[in-house]
Image: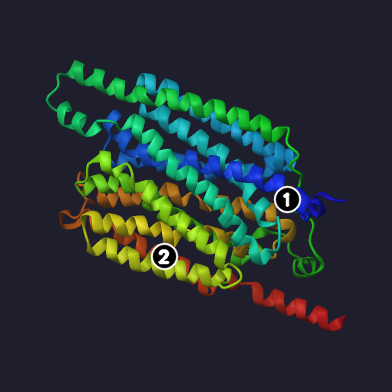
């Protein structure tokens, strides 16, 4: 029995799904720590709002830089060993946080984040297509939704755990800092920075243990270069991934999606603080966003594909995103924050739907197509930084009329792009392929 055939047996599915679920848990935990790191490092390293959002820039730009190299690495190592390498790289990035905290040097924190993102780029390049081809294409969004539950449970826990350690009593500290002498201020901020050392040592140990577990696991390899007959016919004469416009539009859509997801998840604590809400309260807002995402994932598991197609789920998600973004712009305080948190519901089925829609029909181009989609994750590096520029009162692009809610206007066109892909973007370039397949069928 081939590896692909083995994956299709019920006996062999248990272990791969469980192991990939563990990886998605790691994705969520590491990624959503950024929601706490933004306000935490803003205070500990004395940053402006724009500088604080470089946390997401350093983390997510690595996906753009490492996506294509990740495909090359996976060709050499295969999926399983590549996943272990990715976990090891994340551990190195987490380890850098220790000297960064000891020196309170923001550049080292950003380097650590970039390296962590690089490891995640390799892991995501392997795991997302893996779970996509683990069963029938029409239920791929359902399987990714199951992985998303693992991801978002971890993401919900991460800010609570790290926030309880790093953001404890910081509201009082913020008020005291202005009245302190320089020496006292430095001592307080050094103590604040040191709070991340123990958590990140634990993270390093866990990552290394999981890397060993994955390396010695029975996780089978998958040959994504094989094509079924109809896919091979459609791809005859194709020599470049650029000949799949529906994939390229999928990359743009994923770029927009990750941007809005990071704003709703990683940025919501800082946004709540800008709305005048204490950090002791705001530190729970990311968990609220992720609870909404979990609700959406459960809806996806129950409804896709029995009641909702992947395309229709994406349409509904985009429309809901537009509506909630408008509410967030036109309101303030807890209502505006709640609208941002509810974007978690709108966002939940976007990622699971885009992947199978964008990878459909790629055949032997699946690995490089996956790498391009991973590059789209760099939207989390660019879009939140623009959001930070719009919302920062200390620059000329700052808050319009003194209202931080207006910075959410950037979300509306991004959800409209997602809506376009759901309606027609995912079909671009496929009509000719379908006609070819129908002609071949009639010849037979």
Image side of residue 361 versus residue 406, left or right: right
Residue 357 horizontal/vertical position (percent): 60, 65
Residue 247 lies in what quarter of the image? bottom right
Reply above or below: 286 against 300. above
Residue at the image position 50 percent from the left and 67 percent from the top: 314
**Outermost residue, top direction?**
183
Residue at the image position 26 percent from the left and 58 percent from the top: 336
Q: Earlier in the sequence, mark 1 or mark 2?
A: 1
Residue at mark 1 to residue at mark 2: CA–CA distance: 35 Å
Reply above or below: 188 against 52. above
- Between residue 90 and residue 237, name the one nearer to us: 90
Residue 106 horizontal/vertical position (percent): 36, 29
Residue 248 horizontal/vertical position (percent): 57, 62
- Between residue 184 and residue 146, name the one nearer to us: 146
Q: How is the image coloured?
A: rainbow
Check if mark 1's residue and mark 2's residue have beta carbons within 8 Å: no
Circle 1 or circle 2, nearest the eye: 1
Mark drawn on residue 13: 1
Q: Secondary structure at mark 1?
A: helix
Q: Secondary structure at mark 2?
A: helix
**Outermost residue, bottom direction?**
442
For label 2, the residue is 415
């Amino acid at each position: 029995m081939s590896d692909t055939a083995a994956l299709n047996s019920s006996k062999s599915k248990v272990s791969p799904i469980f192991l990939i679920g563990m990886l998605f848990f790691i994705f969520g935990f590491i990624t959503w720590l950024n929601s706490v790191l933004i306000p935490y490092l803003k205070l500990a390293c004395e940053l402006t709002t724009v500088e604080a959002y470089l946390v997401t820039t350093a983390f997510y730009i690595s996906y753009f830089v490492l996506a294509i190299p990740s495909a090359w690495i996976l060709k050499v190592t295969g999926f399983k060993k590549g996943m272990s390498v990715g976990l090891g790289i994340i551990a190195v990035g987490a380890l850098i946080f220790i000297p960064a905290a000891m020196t309170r040097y923001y550049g080292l924190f950003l380097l650590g984040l970039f390296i962590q993102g690089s490891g995640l780029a390799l892991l995501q390049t392997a795991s997302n297509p893996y779970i996509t081809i683990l069963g029938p294409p029409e239920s791929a969004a359902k399987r990714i939704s199951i992985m998303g539950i693992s991801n978002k449970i971890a993401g919900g826990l991460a800010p609570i755990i790290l926030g309880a350690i790093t953001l404890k009593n910081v509201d009082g500290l913020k008020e005291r800092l202005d009245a302190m002498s320089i020496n006292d201020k430095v001592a307080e901020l050094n103590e604040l920075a040191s709070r991340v050392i123990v958590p990140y040592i634990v993270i390093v140990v866990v990552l290394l243990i999981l890397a060993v577990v994955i390396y010695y696991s029975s996780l089978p390899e998958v040959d994504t270069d094989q094509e079924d007959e109809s896919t091979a016919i459609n791809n005859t004469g194709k020599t470049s991934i650029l000949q799949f416009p529906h994939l390229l539009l999928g990359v743009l859509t994923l770029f927009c999606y990750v941007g809005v997801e990071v704003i709703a998840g990683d940025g919501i604590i800082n946004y709540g603080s800008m709305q005048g809400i204490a950090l002791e309260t705001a530190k729970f807002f990311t968990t609220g966003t992720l609870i909404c995402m979990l609700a959406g994932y459960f809806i996806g598991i129950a409804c896709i594909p029995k009641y909702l197609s992947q395309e229709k789920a994406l349409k509904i998600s985009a429309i809901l995103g537009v509506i909630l973004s408008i509410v967030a712009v036109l309101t303030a305080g807890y209502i505006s924050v709640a609208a941002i948190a509810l974007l978690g519901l709108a966002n939940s089925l976007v990622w699971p739907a885009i992947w199978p829609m964008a990878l459909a029909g790629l055949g032997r181009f699946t690995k490089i197509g996956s790498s391009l989609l991973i590059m789209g994750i760099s939207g989390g590096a660019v879009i939140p930084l623009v959001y930070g520029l719009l919302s920062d009162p200390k620059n000329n692009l700052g808050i319009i009329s003194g209202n931080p809610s207006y910075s959410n206007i950037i979300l509306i066109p991004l959800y409209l792009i997602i809506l376009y892909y759901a309606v027609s973007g995912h079909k671009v370039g496929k009509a000719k392929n379908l006609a070819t397949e129908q002609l071949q069928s009639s010849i037979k």
